[in-house]
Each structure stands twice: as structure tokens, then as C-alpha cells.
Image (tube, helix red, strand yellow):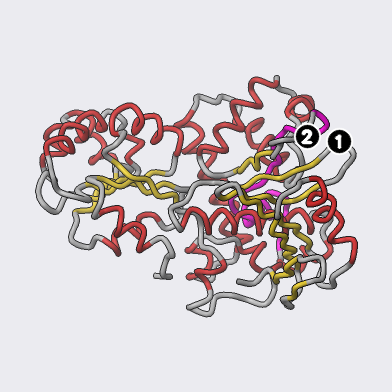
Amino acid sequence: MINRNSTQRLIYLSKTFRSVAVVGPRQSGKTTLCRAVFPEKAYVSLENPDVLEFASSDPRGFLSQFNNEKGAILDEIQKAPHLFSYLQQILDETKNKGLFILTGSNNFLLQENITQTLSGRIAYIQLLPLSLEELKPDNFLKNSYAWHIFTGGYPEVISEEINPADWFPNYISTYIERDVRQLKNITNLSLFTKLLRMCAGRTGQILNMSSMANDCGIDQKTVASWLGILQSSYIIYLLKPYYNNFNKRIIKTPKLYFYDTGVVCSLLGIKRAEEITTHAAKGALFENMVVSELLKERFNAGESDNLFYWRDKTGNEVDVLMENAGKLTAIELKAGETISSDYFKGLDYFSGLLDVDIEKFLIYGGSQTQIRSNSTIIKSWKP
């Protein structure tokens, strides 16, 4: 097992709350992490038809098996939403911390049920695929960012050295056939797949649902609904616009990214890492990799998403903004390995608009770390 940076956070929360939910995309390592941290707990997968039937027909009897000091890990709990009401009673009557560890690959279903029944009784961890930081200790970190974009961060692909060109098509197919059907009764899966591929082609772009609806042959309400499914199951990520203290000439529509670049590469038909260096989407894929790394860093530390982008209607843009306690960090992302003066234009323009100190970073495809005279810190993509 590759050590996960969220391990200590999970241990801490299990000693503070009566239950902890670990959520994230399928195959991101949720089960492996939970079983490694809590080897004494019974492990129950609700994807097992027999287990699910027991939990559905006799939820009280099912949970009574684990109502002891050790508790249990309940995997893919969103498949049995009726259990949450019974869990509420058990958690209300116990003083044991970390009694039930819940995992799930659908954030919408989990959040809905947790908010309704377990609010205040449960803590939350979002576990995304492996970060570059997590790959360092076991020497899985390569010198090529194209390799990491193509391979993505799913543990099985990396630890088992599976060819991403073989693994991801099956992952995507399984996701569409199983998870999408569970979330919503979509009769035309081919159109849903077309929209998903369309999203890959628009990675790093400002979301335009009207254009997507026209190109896909569906209405905007359907596009919005299907994008919601892709968000809640940790396939796509929408980077929010930052428009605090700005006028109406600021873009207020999110940008489209994926949680894992390996998924994007597969949807784009990229078969080898080497293809990325000459691909038209090279810059967008590099941006996507860094945005997902920044998200992983936040989530692994138990912090919420605080990422934004900024763009005005004349084209001035900052790729990523982070706001912490009123302090702004502005980040420019460039795939090029040679630093150009043009790389700093967006950062300098944005910092000139505000009468506050802004921490400025340029993350690029090269290997050097520098501090420029305009107070911009230049960092390599490698952690």
C-alpha cells in the first residue's frame, strides 16, 4: 500500500467523532485506507448482493452485528440509504468514537443522507486519487509531467504498473454502466458518453452549457443534470470564478476540469504519454494536473475547496486563486519548460488591480525554483 497523506487526519477524526465518512471516486483507495487504519473492524461491502439484501430486508438486525466496541467499515454505504436512519439511533446511544467508518463513491447521495440524518454525528474526508506528493516516498514520482498526466493517480494503475490505455477505458465503461444508472435512470447512455467525451475536449475551458447542449443534441436542463452527476461522482470538477470586489466585466461562469487527468487522456484517445508533448490540449492537461494536485493537498489536510480562477471580458486571467483568511494567493500555470516574460502578465495585471498584498506563484513544466524581482515565486510542477 502507498501511504496516504490523509491517514493521520482519518485517525484524528475517528477519535473525535462517532462516525467518519470517507468519500471519493471509485478505485481511489478508500477501502484500502480504511482497512489499513482500522484492521480490528469488521469490513462489509454493500456491493455484495447477499449483504445488500440482508441490509435492505432487516436493517436493524444487520447493524446489530456491529453494535459493539469495534464497530465496522461499511463500504459503498450509498447503496443502502435506508441504513442512515438506523445508524442515527445507534450513534445517538453510543459514546464510542469512530464506531462506524462509512465509504462511498457518490458524494451527492452520501451528503443528502448524512445531512438529513447524521449531521453533527459524523466527520467527512474526501479521498481523491494519489497525489504527486504521495508518490515521492516510494519512488513512483517520475521526471516527466506527461507521464503523470497520462497515468493519472489511481492507485491500481500505479502500484500494479497497468497500462493506462488498458485500464481507463474499462474504468469509464464500468462507471457509466453502473454508477450512472444508479444515480439517474438515463435511457440514452450513448448521449451521456458523448457529453462526457465533449467535457474532455473542453478541459480547462469556461463552461458553456448552451454550446454543449447544441453539440450533443439535448437541452440545457439535461446538460446541467448530467454535469451534476459527473460532479457528484468525482469525474469532473468545476473551478469557481472569483469576482469579489470586481465589476460586471468579470467572467462569472466556472471552468471545467477533471479530478483525474488519466480519465481525460483516455477520453481524448491518447494512447501514450509521449503524445501529450505535441497534443493540442497539452497546456489544458498541465493546468488540470496542477489544479487537481492543489485540490488533493486541501482535501488530504481536511480543508475545504478554496480554489477559484479570475478572468475579465478582455481576456486578462489568473489560472488559480486561493483565499485564506482574507489573504490571496494567485497562481499562473504554464506547461512550458522555459520561462518567458509573458508568463507573468496575468499575475502582474491582477495584482495591480487590488490594494492588498498578493502572494504570486508561477508553476511551470521546468525544474528550477526562483524568486523574481516582481515578487513572483517560480516553482516546478514536481513537489
Q: Quadrant of the N terminus?
A: bottom left
Q: What residue type is disc 1 on? A: Lys
Marks 2 and 1: in contact by CB < 8 Å? yes
Answer with mark 1 or mark 2, whichever residue precedes in sequence.
2
Classify residue 237 by image quadrant.
Answer: top right
Q: Is residue 267 magenta?
A: yes
Residue that badge 2 annotates = 251
Classify residue 252 by image quadrant.
Answer: top right
Residue that badge 1 annotates = 313
Q: Position of residue 87 (x, y in %)?
A: 21, 35
**Which range is magenta?**
248-271
| Element type at mark 1 | loop
Q: Position of residue 328 (x, y in %)?
A: 65, 51
Q: Is residue 270 above or below residue 227?
A: below
Going 16% across and 39% down the picture, which residue do you hit? 63
Q: Is residue 33 above or below residue 80?
A: below
Q: Residues within 10 Å of mark 1 (few under 14, many from 20)?
A: few
Going 45% across and 53% down the picture, which residue do you hit? 127
